[in-house]
Image (spheres, rainbow, N blue to C red):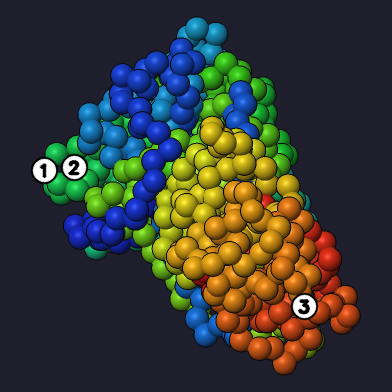
Amino acid sequence: MYNATRWRRSCNGLWPPRSPVQPTVGHRVPHYSRGQLASPTMSLMKNEGTIGSRLGRLLTAFVTAVVVLVPNTAVAGQDLDTVTFNGAGWGHGVGLSQYGALGAAQDGWLYDQIISYFYSGSSVGTLGENGLPPAQNLWVNLEKDRSSLELIARSTGLGADVDVVVTRESEQWVLSKNQRVAFSYDKGLCGLVIKGTDGSVIDDAGTGPCVVDIDWDGFEAVPTRKIAIAGCTNPNWNTIPTTYPECQYGRGQLHLRSGPGGMDLSLEIDINDYVKGISEMPYFWGLTDYDPKTDGGIEALKSQAVAARSYAFELMLFREAGDGPPGNNSCGAWCHVRDTTIDQRYVGWGHAGFGITEWLEAVDATKNVVITHPDAPTQTIVRGYYSSSSGGATENVNEVWSSWSPRPYYQSVDSVWDVADAANPNSDWARDFTGSYVAGKVGLETLTGVEVTAVNTSGSANTVVFTGLKDGAGATVTKTAASVKSLFGLRSIYFRVNEPYGGPVDPPTFNDTAGSVHEANIEWAAAQGITLGCNPPANTSFCPEQPVTRGQMAAFLRRTLGLPAASMDYFSDDSGNIFEGDINAIAEVGITSGCDGGPSFCPDDPVTRGEMAAFLNRAYGLAASSVDYFNDDDTSIFEQDINRLRLAGITLGCNPPTNDNFCPDDPVTRAQMATFLHRAVDG
């Protein structure tokens, strides 16, 4: 559920495994708001469909994905020495942000308001009421494909111990305190041995079916027994320092079954008792006299409890339709949910430390409460995805997980609490690598550039392009941000390369650029005053696919370079043209000499890619290249300009992925020109 490196129980949780007494304080990342953040009152209105938002783990009716090109983030003509990923947040960013929930709680939001905000248009409901299914027991996989396994009867110390009963078919054995039952697996059968407290064999029952149940008073309000798994520990990050108690289970009953690769051990447990054993949010957030950065988060704990319950209960309904004990499914044999962060981290009995009382109170205060939305396909219950924190806005689910369609309750919403100067140690982060290391990881010999070429609605990275050499020729490698995250061990996909991560993106300036790979460069050009648009006086459109005329090109260059007015009129065919002043300005500094070697400029002719290369070379004095990069420009008078452009990283070519052609006679579109100019300026 949380996309961090998985480890068996001792996994990367949603909050860092560090001492809770000394939380790391991150630095604020600039955040560019996409609109007024909803107040608690506005959040209540979301349930009526007037405002949308949503919540979920460490993962719309209708939301359109925004994919845009962003500025060149590390383009150079020579090999890169260092590649720095600058980012924010931790996890997949879908649904509830845990640090966002903490910030909202500290701002006075109640848990139902937090839920409604992060899970757009959702509300909370109670199992067994208003058409929702009743609460049911959940099967939690604890061990999978084991060849041997030993369980120990322990005491909770909360009353007179009752018997622990081990049942296989018609046979039963009783375990007293600290006695053990050992299992071994061989060809679909399970051996069973009862051992004393000293490990000596009391009864060797031989092999039999791998259908064994272990019962005690686990469904009572206060169990007196708990069962430990020998050799298993669960790191407890709510203690100082972190402790590693053995894996113990006091609520429910255990079932041993035969799986496809050995023995599977599952815990059958009441859904609310299950939530008490969830360890995904620091329990001490619920305290009021511990740390001012994290105090006052009891409503965040309640939000976490509701999300965890919703996640598990919806998965149970989805995987088994709530009909009897589970069989084989995507979770494995005899399983509704797993106890690791592949689903969510369940630690069983006995995790104590800072805030454990507050966590149990939060679970009890939200008993049987789940997230609901009328469009949720599993009996209107929303699977409560959540993650540690975002980069300032949560994700649209379809932009993070391509196999998902848009969901109204998994929409991107602002979460400014994630990047504020508060408790979140991942409000910003950076990871440095050598250029040669990055090149090797992506299959290149040398690396000359890294570019985030598309971003999601939240502002997180979507697509990353690596440029360099392979087999002696120019090459590009395109990867999803998710694969880059995995490849380099990044904490999230909220990142940029060799520049600061700036947070969520603003709405587009123009109404006709959404989805264009050049959108961010167009936005840059608009912000710099290089372009106003193509439909004055409103200028609400950019006309990205229209060819750039030579007159428009002159205006683009003059505004980019800030050239003064010219001292004379250089050409005979631009009198009265709106770009006459721009044309004369670039002529005066030697960027153009005309279109026919004479007195004409041809202001209304389209600019070809070859001409564009010459304009930019003259404007920026690009370095000469000793390499002929392209196959189709040998007869072009602009060949040297084109090679200089490629060396500077302003262009890659016109026929990806090989990019061995430049198409020098093709016209340049307005969108392409915005990108060329931005790369030239950044280069």
Labelled pair 2, 1 in contact (Cβ < 8 Å): yes
Q: CA distance from mark 2 to mark 3?
A: 65 Å
Going from N to C along the chain, the mark reached first, 2 or 1, is 1
Give the camera-side residue of 70 and 42.
Answer: 70
Residue corresponding to mark 2: 295
First-in-chain label (2 vs 3): 2
- Amino acid identity at mark 3: Phe
Disc 3 target residue: 638
* Residue wearing tag 1: 289
| Foreground label between 2 and 3 | 3
Q: Residue furthest top?
A: 130
Q: Nearer the viewer, residue 504 or 351?
A: 504
Which image quadrant is residue 273 in? top left
- On the rendered image, what quadrant is the C terminus found in? bottom right
Q: Viewed as shown, does residue 475 lie left or right of 106?
A: right
Give, as a three-letter code, the residue at label 1. Answer: Asp
Q: Is residue 661 above or below residue 10?
A: below
Q: How far apart are labels 2 and 1 at the CA level? A: 7 Å
Element on which disc 2 rests: loop
Q: Position of residue 459 (x, y in %)?
A: 50, 49
Q: Residue at x 29, y 55 (%)?
A: 28
Q: Is residue 284 above or below residue 487?
A: above
Q: Is residue 648 above or below residue 132?
A: below
Amino acid identity at mark 2: Asp
- The outermost residue toward the left is 289
Crowding at dot 3, Cα within 10 Å, few <14 / some 14-19 / many 20+, comes out as: some
Q: Secondary structure at mark 1?
A: loop
Is residue 465 left or right of 629 when viewed as pictured? left
Instruction: Mark yes or no: residue 248 visible.
Output: no
Mark 1 or 3, which is nearer the eye? 3
**Residue at point 19% right, 57% down?**
21
